[in-house]
Image: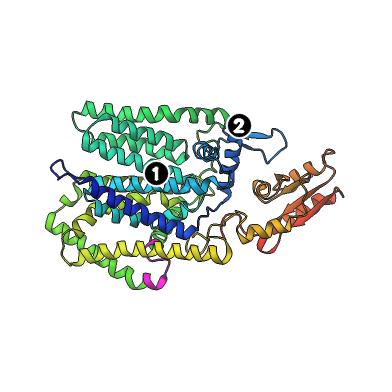
Amino acid sequence: MTSPASPAIPPKAIFIYAAFSLLLVLVLTLHATRGHVAYTMDSLTYRDAALNFLSGHPMKVTNVVSETPVRIPSAQWPPAYPALWASFTLIPGLDIDHAPLILNPILLCITVLAMFWACLTLTGRPAIASIVTASSMFTPSSMAVFGHAWSETLFIPLVLLAFGFLLKYKQAGRWVFWLAAATCIGIANWTRYTGAIFLPLLCLTVFLISCGTYTKRMLHASGALLVSLLITMPLWLHNWNLSGNISGSARGGAVTHVLDRLSMDIETVQRLLEYSLFDFDTVISAFLKIPMLVAALYLVFRAARTSGFRILLPLCTWLPLLWFTVNLAFLFYGRVTQKGIDLDLRMLAVPFPFFFMAISPLVKTTLLSRKLNLATLLISLILGLFIYTGWQEGQRVNENYLSSRTPGWRADFGPVYRDLTESSRTTRALKESIAFLKPSSLVLTDYRALYIRYLTDVKAYAVNNEKDCKAWVANPNHPVGVLLVGLKDSVAWASRCVAANPGWRLFQVTGRAAPSMNVE
């Protein structure tokens, strides 16, 4: 981080470089998305929660398991993002599906400016802050997040603002900055439950960067933690009363073969980072990966011989690396202790910016040396590759929107996130195949019932087995209905279920209308 003796930065220079970063990222994002925002099932759940906010039922979601009650608590889904989504529909001319078209760019702008502010504080150079910010925002993980209606679009700027306030606290020493950081972390916990990891991280960071006596540092660290807990605790208590769990529900339980899974997860993260650097291109990776790794190891070895371990001493150089490492470790922990969580580019969108912050002082030292040496070439190549990958990913998504009206944001090397909006070809195929359904129809489905409700006006409910299905069909209040199945494994029990009541009809969705709900 800059020292007090550093020369003052002209406000005009800060404004110009911040505006340049903002314009560059906005232009690329809008070029890629063509003004669209994609939906996944998470998006539809947040959309439903937002609609319930607007109807006067905050922190509720539609019950798609049984007819009563009509709404159930949305403990599993934190309320901050759907509340913000709902608030944007109060703007004249914006309905529930047009609000994200305005909300996403605004949150993207806040994210870019928060990232620029943090990098500027770390390096003291607006030009370097601009380069690092653009490189960070051009990663496929960041672009995919802001191409969807996901809660990460709110969570990421909150976390980056918190980190920026902590850097400012280190610089100015005023308690108001750790108070602002603690407030951001508290709100972040109302946005995503993974924000819990930032509570101890906030406390540790304030303690490490505080000046003064041990007692003063402990007071400030404890104060920051207390403020965040005071903001977060009402949500946790609400969830605990409902489900006995602060995150609203049990998340699956521990898995077996922990070491094997951890090894697989480390390999997955390494692969995703590699894809983000080499544009998902195995040829580029094959030619550049080994030479770049050798060059990096040589530079580290040479720096260690020249300076010993002094390279590791500046705390604010390694503070972003601490946040990056803790976030990544928390992802591994989530995979080891919970079932059904798969690492993908979306999950890397939170720790990724801290990686770029961690290398920003190195970028500054290298690029400002004005010497054409191995370090300059390596850093320039890495940043150039990130920007190239971002541009290529944006261009690919743009072409996908033009050709098929669906973005195909990458989730991994091959799979892409499935867009569930009515503009996508798959969703249109499904809607056409169930066009026979009437608003009065009762529909049971092994699809996501909320998805069927989004596409139609029918009352759709979820069933996943023969026992639950027969309970519905045997109900005298439902003499007729439709059982809509998309999974091949469901056809057998669904056929036996409708056979018990001739008034019920079995309809199987096939072809393009019935791929995976999440990725394709």
Residue at 22%, 51% (x, y): give it. Answer: 125
Quadrant for the N terminus in the image: top left
Q: CA distance from mark 1 to mark 2?
A: 27 Å
- Does residue 325 show up? no
Residue at 26%, 48% (x, y): give it. Answer: 14
- Does residue 194 show up? yes
The numbered dot on residue 57 is 2
Name the N-terminal-most of marks 1 and 2: 2
Rendered image quadrant of residue 140: bottom left
In this rendered view, identify the residue nearer to me: 316 or 152: 152
Q: Is residue 265 left or right of residue 489?
A: left
Number of marks in the image? 2
Residue at 29%, 45% (x, y): give it. Answer: 118
Percent x, y of residue 122: 24, 47
Q: Is residue 284 magenta?
A: yes
The span picked out in magenta is 276-285
Percent x, y of residue 361: 23, 52
> Label 1 sits on what residue type?
Pro
Question: Mark 1, residues whose alpha carbon is within 10 Å: few (<14), some, or many (≥20)?
Answer: many
**Mark 1 highlights which residue?**
157
Percent x, y of residue 506: 79, 54
Residue furthest to the front: 92
Q: Secondary structure at mark 1?
A: helix
Where 240 falls versus 28 (above or below)?
above
Majority secondary structure of the magenta segment? helix
Q: Coloured how?
A: rainbow
Q: Secondary structure at mark 2?
A: loop
